[in-house]
Image (tube, coloured by chain):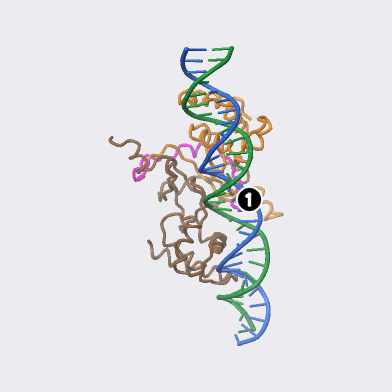
Chain colours: A brown, B orange, C green, D blue
Amino acid sequence: MDQDRVDNGLRRFESLCRERGLPLTVQRREILKALLQRDDHPTADQVYGCVKERITGLSRTTVYRVLETLVRLGVVRRLHHPGTSVRFDGKISRHHHLVCRKCNRVIDLENRSLDHLELSSMRLHGFQVEDYSVHLVGVCADCGRKSRPTS
Amino acid sequence: MDQDRVDNGLRRFESLCRERGLPLTVQRREILKALLQRDDHPTADQVYGCVKERITGLSRTTVYRVLETLVRLGVVRRLHHPGTSVRFDGKISRHHHLVCRKCNRVIDLENRSLDHLELSSMRLHGFQVEDYSVHLVGVCADCGRKSRPTS
DNA sequence: TGCCTAGATGGTAATTGTTACCAAAAAATG
DNA sequence: CATTTTTTGGTAACAATTACCATCTAGGCA
């Protein structure tokens, strides 16, 4: 867990709220904090699971709504894993994903050489690229170990 | 629509079925054919919608099951769009995706310069990469036009 | 060709993830 | 503080997907 990322994220969130006149609620702050403190990509339900201990009476509906708000503010990313449900990621700096086709796990990958792809010369039919990420699909270490026991 | 892709896909599917002792059913063949004939990424329900006309009494459940089987065989890809439900793609050659963050549309992008990223030097923590794709996130031509009417 | 068996299909019911709705509660503003 | 606006909580609705089981079909064999 990276305390700086947590602090910066919260600060950025607070100033964005003031800018747009959005009330700063306990729920929004705690849900964002929980996301920033994690290194994985929890589902809405997993977020609910870990935040409800800090906010008594927290509703699942609120979690969905707040996550949506945070995405709109640009402080959280929505991810679409091969598993099932939508996932959320508090890390908004450019990073890529290792996707295991066996267990469906998605692991973050930070890699400088993938961060600077040359896109300018591409014919994109009027599509304006704002960001990108590379999805590497394959077999993760755990699953690879399982399928070939001794080699 | 690319007749070669359809034919090749069906042939590959049939030999894979024989290899693994999977029965060659009408439903499997028609569902795969429908996917190969399309250029977009339909949901299970959209596949159901266009195949049920050719197979009377086709069940939605079967569509889900067959799509799963086709993915396992490797003749169809499962995609996870920002929209909601899972989508399926009969094109299994390497290609990339333009993802519009406004309308959630996903457009295929074929681009040679993205097809040969240098991955060998990467530290992947034991992850074995089999394939990859680049997701370009931004605003599609239609949505861009809407938000800035005259410029 | 017709029978047999494993495996696939159809249809309904159950489950899961997500959204709609509205009354009650909490922020912001002056 | 009082007011106004927005959010929250909770339930009900909804949509996508899966479980289950009786029926049916493809493929192998006599």
The overriding secondary structure of the stretch rendered in magenta is loop
| Name of the residue lying farthest toward the left | A150
Looking at the image, which is closer to me, A94 or C22?
Answer: C22
Name above or below for residue D2 compared with residue A74.
Answer: below
Q: Position of residue B45 (x, y in %)?
A: 62, 41
Q: Secondary structure at mark 1?
A: loop
Label 1 sits on residue: B103
Image-based side of B67 in relation to A136, left or right: right
Name above or below for residue B21 compared with residue A106.
Answer: above
Q: Position of residue A122 (x, y in %)?
A: 56, 42
Q: Position of residue B77 (x, y in %)?
A: 52, 37
**Residue A17 is one of the magenta-drawn residues:** no
Marked residue chain, label 1 = B
Q: Position of residue B20 (x, y in %)?
A: 45, 26
Q: Residue at x 51, y 48 (%)?
A: A84
Indicate the quadrant containing the N terminus of chain A: top left, top right, bottom left or bottom right: bottom left
Circle 1: residue type: Cys
**Residue B117 is one of the magenta-drawn residues:** yes
Name above or below for residue B51 compared with residue A2.
Answer: above
Extent of the magenta region: B101-127
How many discs mark residues in the rendered view?
1
